[in-house]
């Protein structure tokens, strides 16, 4: 007879992981789908509701209170201090009875009065457990990574094991374990019934004091660099059957709206449980290309002038909406003049992603709590599913040119294309730069192939960067690269790229240093070309304006890479930036900005994987100094 699959663990979130009042946090947790909460003591102390009212509020929301936390500096202290600790504990246990929770977190002591005496610590924790048992409470002892004498989970477990009390167990915290580099395999030696609670958090790899790291930089599983899934596997193998609880201390989370944060948190637990085989979600469907990028604008002329200079042609118009399709080879840009606010100008509002199974991709997105966008369809409109990314960008699930699947292009009526050599589907047949012009000293390249979207760069709201990374990884199945910091003249930008394994879908996510940073709204579309020099010349000859790069950059470029003088002069004249690594070369240049959008021309030689990060500070400074186009 087949073995029944274990039920998914219950999910829980610490109130410290969300912003707002306690009632706002509880409401957000319930709406996001959590089963329970940890009540952080400061949240209770600041609440106008008393313990019984909080208990009733949680019951109304369908939430259990799974943990009350924390009690601090309890164990391994002189007798007079311990007597005072017991008096304090009695009050807390009475409070917990009114709250309706039966587990309290006790952190390993950081008190200067604590002594390095495991036997004393075990004895005092056993006496605490005696008192707790009178109130029907269990004590979960946790090793803080910065504990004065107990800072590792295995040390905390030895003390619990020595105490040998049925009301005393251990609490495991992924941050405290993984931040110290402890080996989590030893967790499997702890009896599952003695693991009273599990707290989960991720974090970026940082070289800093562990206390500051913990208090300011924790994030939800899947958003950092820890192997939280590996740790969870060890905990489940040990026999743990309690809730999976998130405890995240993070400066951004503390200021972000509680509702979206709670949804992001719950999504992280769904992805984590999928990774360890405890929930079944619709399988990931990885996108295979960019079907289109949609620009919304109150005035189409400035952006269509740029598109025309880039070699795009207006090939079709939507049957029922003011949306034009501009195309060059495989690159398709929709220009939508409905609903844009003039003060915001041109914006990148939507992306069509190619999927081998669009319906399957939509099912996974919905299962992972992505907001499904309602669509008003006219009779005969193509049935396309769409969801909203964390930054509000609309993501459409597309299949272009597959007869067995709905094709979004059937909503468009072809327009006559004049003055262009067109290929299949009425698209211009070659990339910008029809006549290749080699950089001085180079062998003339082969004729460029059809242009396509090389990558998209999306700037995120300052409080949603980590959420965006998890969304693109979990919902879309894209791989994430390491985060990089980019120097901007007015702050520091953070960027992280996500892509499919083949590199057909590349998205660079970035965020500015704070909520008032204007650069956080810039977006751009990078177009691949086989010859960026020829493409830049053609664009400029057609009336396009390229971003000017300071001469100092090219002086340094010649020194760094030993490029010939005439090649550097060509790059300087056209504003082309250059990067090289062991895998290949990257040449790229930028148009001026229209509204909130600009374009990049990209030539990759070899297998260069980058996005021009070494050049970004120069590019950002040049953009700050450039005069923006209207739109």
Image (cartoon, helix red, strand yellow):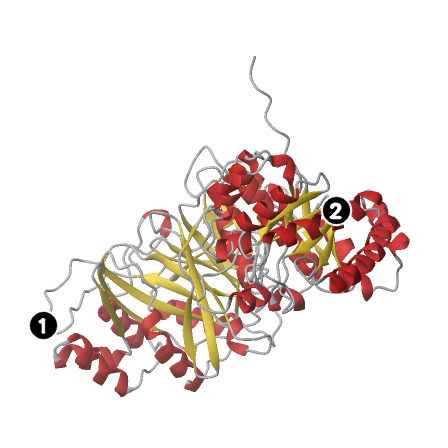
Residue 324 located left or right of residue 532: right
Give whichever of 52, 262 is nearer the camera.
52
Task: Give how far across and how far down residue 120 sits, in percent.
Answer: 65, 54
Residue 409 located left or right of residue 505: right
Q: Name the secondary structure under disc 2.
A: helix
Residue bearing the label numbered 1: 441
Q: Which marked residue is nearer to the observer: mark 1 or mark 2?
A: 2
**440 versus 70 height, above or below:** below
Whether residue 367 is visible, yes or no, is yes
**622 versus 292 height, above or below:** below
State the count of labels: 2
Crowdedness near tag 2: few (<14), some (14–19) or many (≥20) residues, C-alpha within 10 Å: many
Image quarter where the N terminus lies is top right
Task: Give how far across and how far down residue 110 sits, in percent.
Answer: 62, 65
Give whichever of 339, 599 is nearer the camera.
599
Residue bearing the label numbered 2: 129
Would you identify the image quadrant in which residue 176 lies?
Answer: bottom right
Residue 428 located left or right of residue 197: left
Task: Give how far across and how far down residue 353 sits, in percent.
Answer: 46, 49
Residue drawn at (61%, 69%) of the image:
251
Cα separation, mark 1 vs mark 2, equals 80 Å
Crowdedness near tag 1: few (<14), some (14–19) or many (≥20) residues, C-alpha within 10 Å: few
Query: Which one is earlier in the sequence, the residue at label 1 or at label 2?
Result: 2
Q: Name the secondary structure under disc 1.
A: loop
Task: Give how far across and how far down residue 166 sits, in percent.
Answer: 71, 38
- Residue 373 disc label: none
- Residues tagged 1 and 2 counted as in contact (Cβ below 8 A): no
Give whichever of 231, 431 is nearer the camera.
231
Give whichever of 628, 202 is nearer the camera.
202
**149 versus 559 height, above or below:** above
């Amino acid at each position: 007879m087949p073995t029944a699959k274990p039920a998914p663990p219950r999910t829980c979130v610490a109130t410290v992981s969300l912003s707002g009042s306690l009632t706002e946090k509880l409401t957000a947790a319930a709406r996001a789908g959590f089963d329970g909460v940890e009540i952080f003591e400061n949240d209770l102390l600041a609440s106008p509701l008393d313990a019984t009212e909080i208990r009733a509020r949680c019951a109304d929301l369908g939430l259990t209170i799974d943990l009350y936390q924390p009690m601090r500096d309890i164990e391994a202290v002189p007798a007079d201090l311990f007597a005072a600790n017991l008096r304090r504990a009695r009050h807390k246990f009475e409070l917990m009875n009114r709250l309706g929770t039966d587990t309290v977190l006790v952190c390993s002591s950081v008190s200067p009065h604590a002594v390095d005496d495991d036997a004393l610590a075990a004895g005092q924790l056993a006496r605490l457990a005696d008192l707790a048992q009178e109130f029907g409470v269990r004590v979960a002892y946790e090793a803080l990574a910065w504990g004065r004498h107990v800072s590792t989970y295995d040390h905390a477990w030895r003390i619990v094991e020595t105490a040998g009390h049925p009301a005393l167990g251990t609490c495991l915290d992924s941050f405290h374990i993984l931040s110290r580099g402890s080996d989590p395999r030893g967790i499997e030696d702890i009896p599952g019934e003695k693991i009273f609670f599990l707290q989960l958090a991720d974090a970026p790899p940082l070289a800093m004091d562990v206390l500051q790291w913990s208090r300011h930089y924790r994030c939800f599983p899947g958003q950092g660099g820890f192997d939280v899934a590996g740790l969870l596997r060890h905990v489940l193998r040990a026999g743990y059957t309690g809730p999976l609880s998130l405890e995240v201390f993070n400066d951004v989370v503390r200021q972000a709206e509680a509702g979206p944060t709670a949804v992001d948190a719950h999504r992280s637990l769904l992805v984590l449980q999928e990774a360890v085989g405890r929930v079944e979600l619709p399988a990931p469907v990885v996108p295979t290309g960019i079907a289109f990028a949609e620009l919304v604008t109150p005035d189409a002329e400035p952006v269509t002038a740029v598109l025309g200079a880039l070699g795009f042609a207006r090939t079709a118009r939507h049957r029922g909406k003011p949306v034009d399709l501009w195309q060059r080879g495989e690159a398709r840009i929709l220009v939508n003049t409905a609903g844009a606010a003039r003060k915001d100008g041109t914006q990148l509002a939507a992306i069509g992603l190619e999927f081998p199974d669009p319906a399957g991709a939509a099912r996974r997105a919905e299962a992972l709590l992505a907001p499904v966008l309602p669509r008003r369809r006219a009779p005969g409109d193509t049935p396309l599913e769409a969801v909203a990314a964390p930054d509000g960008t609309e993501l459409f699930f597309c299949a272009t040119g597959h007869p067995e699947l709905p094709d979004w292009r059937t909503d468009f009526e072809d327009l006559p294309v004049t003055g262009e050599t067109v290929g299949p589907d009425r698209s211009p047949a070659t990339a910008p730069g029809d006549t290749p012009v080699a950089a001085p000293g180079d062998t003339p390249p082969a004729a460029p192939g059809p242009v396509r979207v090389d990558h998209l760069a999306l700037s995120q709201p300052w409080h949603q960067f980590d959420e965006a990374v998890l969304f693109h990884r979990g919902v879309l199945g894209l791989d994430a690269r390491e985060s990089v910091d980019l120097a901007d003249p007015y702050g520091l930008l953070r960027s992280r790229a996500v892509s499919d394994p083949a590199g057909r879908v590349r998205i660079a996510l970035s965020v500015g240093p704070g909520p008032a940073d204007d650069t956080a709204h810039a977006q751009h579309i990078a177009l691949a070309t086989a010859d960026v020099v020829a493409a830049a010349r053609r664009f400029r000859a057609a009336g396009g304006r390229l971003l000017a790069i300071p001469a100092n950059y090219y002086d340094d470029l010649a020194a760094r890479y030993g490029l010939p003088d005439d090649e550097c002069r060509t790059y300087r004249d056209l504003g082309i930036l250059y990067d090289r690594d062991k895998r290949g070369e990257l040449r790229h240049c930028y148009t001026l900005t229209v509204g909130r959008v600009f374009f990049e021309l990209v030539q990759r030689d070899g297998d260069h994987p980058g996005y021009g990060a070494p050049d970004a500070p120069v590019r950002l400074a040049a953009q700050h100094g450039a005069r923006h186009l209207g739109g």
